[in-house]
Image: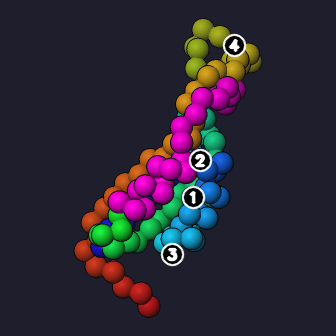
Amino acid sequence: MKLILAIVQDKDASRLRNEFIESNVRATKLSTTGGFLKSGNTTFIIGIADDRVDEVLSMIKKTSQARQEYVTPPMNLDASSDGSITSPVEVQVGGATVFVLPVEQFHQF
């Protein structure tokens, strides 16, 4: 058994959740916040049998594509500036960060 932690952008979360439902993959969904851009993310916690890990990873990859967007950073990182002017910058958003961890024990009470 493996534990998969998948962090995806909120825009991709509904599609991924639907894929999980259609494939009978049980997942716990948590609302989380990203670091630098402070954007909304969703973290899925999935306990899955070893032989279904690749299937779940394929679903995540299919629904969580990276893309370029223009965003206004929450703060100006230029120390020489007064900090009041922030210009939109092009950044890569979306995609997924996934951790696959071994599970020593599983209990359901």
Q: Is residue 33 visible?
A: no
Taking depth in this image into account, of 109 and 77 the one nearest to the observer is: 109
Quadrant assignment for the N terminus: bottom left
Q: Is residue 60 visible?
A: yes
Give whichever of discs 4 and 2 has the lower sequence position.
2
Give whichever of discs 3 and 4 has the lower sequence position.
3
Quote the CA–CA distance across marks 3 and 2: 22 Å
Mark 1, secondary structure of its residue: helix
Give whichever of discs 1 and 2 has the lower sequence position.
2
The residue identified by callout 1 is 16
Residue 8 pos. (x, y %): 54, 50
Residue 36 got which mark? none
In the image, which is nearer the foreground, mark 4 or mark 2?
2
Residue 82 got which mark? 4
75 up-or-down from 60: above or below: above
In the image, which is nearer the foreground, mark 1 or mark 4?
1
Q: Is residue 64 toward the left or the right of residue 10 in the image?
A: left
The residue identified by callout 2 is 9
**How many discs mark residues in the rendered view?**
4
Mark 3, secondary structure of its residue: loop
**Magenta segment, which residues?**
54-74
